[in-house]
Image (cartoon, rainbow, N blue to C red):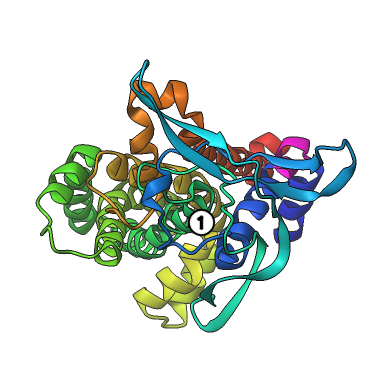
Amino acid sequence: MFKEVIKKLWTDKFARIALILLGIIYFSLIFADFIAPYTKDFSDRQMAYVPPSKIFVIDENYHISKPYTYNYIRGFDGENLKITYNLDRSQKHYIKFFAKGQPYKFLGLIPMQHHFITTDSAGRLYLLGTDINGRDVFSRILFGGRISMTIGFLALFVLFPIGLLYGGISGYFGGVVDMLMMRFAEAVMSIPSFYLLIILASILPSGMTSVQRFMLIVVILALIGWAGFARVVRGMVLSVKNQEFVQAAQSIGASKLRIIIKHILPQTTSFVIVAMTLSVPSYILSESGLSFLGLGIQQPDASWGNMLKEAQEYTNIIYRPWLLTPGFLIFIAVLAFNVIGDTIRDVLDPKSNK
């Protein structure tokens, strides 16, 4: 089955593009410390809202040159009452690859100084401009994506075991047990999840670190989402619990828990794979929405949601469009996961195969 799914994903044009895009995103996030020109703590407050650096490959004599850039000079337009940035053409700053830059710990363990792309110590390389605090947007996108793109999978690791076991027990035992368990699950499902998230996030202590908030959001998302999943699993268990292989396990004296875990729940594998793939985008959007509202990951730590919050102002949308990049990446990631999920569903659904 696994080989068939991989083959279908790769032969389907749109699914292949989605896989490649997600592969690039996750590769970049894993090696963010190396790829990013600056560390996550870098800030130059004199360079707030600097536009993306212009990279030149032709010099002033119209000859091909090594890639270089110029620093920006901050000025003030008294007539229009706004800050301006002009190129300082008095000194070139050459782009360097695999060169030394700001020190960091690779994968949080190995001390390193080499970056994939950087410039000399006197130069500034802002591939996607800077934010209001003079922080490199490109570097923060890489570090912030680690939170936004992993929160869904972490929530699933909590949600799916609970939903599988709860639904399996409810469907297998049936009767009063099934009725009580399903009524409780339906009560959980009736809770408006996003509003609950907003309420819970708003009452969290202000002194919590972003790591603590991150883990708490994961737990909250998982505790909200398990009920709907458990209800579907319960229906699938009802359809298979009277089949011969289950009766055979009962006849040899296998315990009820063993029958549920070893014999019945594996029959739901196809649904679980599809549900996991299609659930990740909703958790990415939930985290981004909370951070956008200021109730999730807090500054100075980055996530795509709280980075996008800065772009909600009309002037930033018009004059600083690079601040919208996190929103574009959220759109790409969610779309890619949905395309992959739909393709896997088509492969594992017997009706569609016919």
Q: Quadrant of residue 37?
A: bottom right
* Neighbours of disc 1 within 10 Å: few (<14), some (14-19), many (20+): some
Tell me if 352 is positioned left or right of 213 in this view: right
Under mark 1, the amino acid is Thr
Magenta region: 12-17
Q: Position of residue 340 (x, y in %)?
A: 63, 43
Q: Is residue 184 above or below residue 324?
A: below
In this view, the residue in front, 41 or 299, is 41
**Residue 354 in view in this figure:** no
The residue beneath circle 1 is 268
Examine the residues drawn in magenta and state their main secondary structure.
helix
Q: Position of residue 339 (x, y in %)?
A: 62, 38
In this view, the residue in front, 150 or 132, is 132
Q: Quadrant of residue 175?
A: bottom left
Q: Which residue is at a point 72% across and 36% down the rendered structure image? A: 14
Q: Position of residue 290 (x, y in %)?
A: 28, 43
In this view, the residue in front, 228 or 157, is 157
Q: Which residue is at a point 49% across and 34% down the rendered structure image? A: 85
Tell me if 64 is positioned left or right of 144 in this view: right
In this view, the residue in front, 143 or 92, is 92
The residue lying furthest to the top in this view is 79
**Magenta highlight on residue 80:** no
The residue lying furthest to the right in this view is 63
Image mark count: 1
What quarter of the picture does the N terminus occupy? bottom right
Q: Position of residue 128 (x, y in %)?
A: 55, 42
Q: Is residue 24 above or below residue 108?
A: above
Q: Which residue is at a point 37% across and 58% down the rendered structure image? A: 155
What quarter of the picture does the C terminus occupy? top right
**Magenta highlight on residue 15:** yes
